[in-house]
Amino acid sequence: MRIFLNFYIILLFLFFNTSCKDKSRFFINTQQTSTPISIERFDKDIYSLQSGNYTNKIDSLYHTYGSFVDIYTQHILEIGLFRNTGESIVTTNATDEIRKMLQDSMVKVLYQDCFKEYRTTKDVEQTLNTAFGYFQHYFPNKQLPRVLFHFSGFHQSIVFTDSVVSASVEHYLGPDYPIYQQVAYQYEIPTMNRKQLPIDIVHAWIKRYYEIETPHERLLDQLIYEGKIRYLLSIFFPEYTEYEIMGYSKEQYEWSVKNEKNIWAYIIENKRLFSNNWREIAGFINPGPFTSGLSQESPGRIGVWIGFRIVQQYAENNKDVTLEKLMEDNNSQRILELSGYRP
């Protein structure tokens, strides 16, 4: 009995010791923060326009969502405005077009599938509460967004304004959703899922405050910029794996780790690091079936992953650097040097 008890104590010690080691130095207890994120269903309110008093419902939309209504019709759907002025509702192209959209048989199917998949959003809100709890803790002078769902007909998946971030919900119905085979590239489909949704929302909100500011940016600047954002996400989503933060499969992530030294050697030997050729930069940063210049087994956006690894090592080796200081530091070369990155 004593042997068994001692063995049990050792197991407990190893478990808690390992857990503590896995925690980032930026770990916080978000249960002690107050971030009541509640997803507002703009998508449902738009769908209600198919019946009832059209004018009153549009009035209600403007009352609830303000200028986002105009952003939605003019810039997301690109069908014009409901109102020509802020004082009255007039018959415009937008009213006819929104009716046509809502009456389309494919749109009706998509809408119903969205309502079914997201009949409850408590899990998404809980994840967002944790992530924005971190955001609020480490960036106390930055405001939290209103979070909306909208329907865009497969236009951009996330849009944001100064106060709102909204997700086009039909982009997140799961990789097995049959319509995706017709409207998306194969390399995009694995991340069109419920778990990716809060990452994309928070990612957009970080970019709302931090845009790359280096003029004529080089690949290095893009690597560090994207790496900083992924590093924040890895902290804000402590329950997510690093490959989920990257939007990679486990196999893609393992390939990246295994070939990290070769990837960095390719960048250096081919003089890509300080290149400002937008085609070369896009090949490392933009999504794709693989990264241009590397094996077709490589995942896309390998430069983003390399940037994440550099920033991760920089933060580990420079304990005095806060997250605010990290995001405000645009000296990419200094960050690289102080990271000691040598894969």
Image: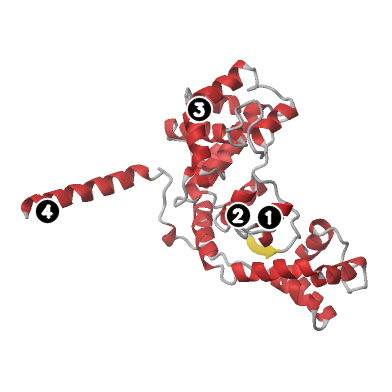
Q: Amino acid at mark 1?
A: Tyr
Q: What is the quadrant of residue 60 in the picture?
A: bottom right
Q: Nearer the viewer, residue 88 or 81?
A: 81
Considering only order in the chain, which callout, 4 or 1, is on the residue closer to the N terminus? 4
Q: Which residue was labeled with disc 4?
A: 5
Q: Nearer the viewer, residue 198 or 131?
A: 198
Considering only order in the chain, which callout, 3 or 2, is on the residue closer to the N terminus? 2
Compared with residue 146, is residue 51 higher up or lower down, i.e. above or below?
A: below
Q: What x and y, as percent, mark residue 250?
A: 49, 43
For the point 70% across and 27% down, which residue is it?
Answer: 280
Compared with residue 218, is residue 235 higher up or lower down, i.e. above or below?
A: below
Q: What x and y, as percent, mark residue 328?
A: 59, 38
Q: What x and y, as percent, mark residue 125?
A: 54, 64
Q: Which residue was labeled with disc 2?
A: 175
Cα distance between the residues tagged 1 and 4? 54 Å
For the point 88% across and 71% down, which residue is it?
Answer: 95
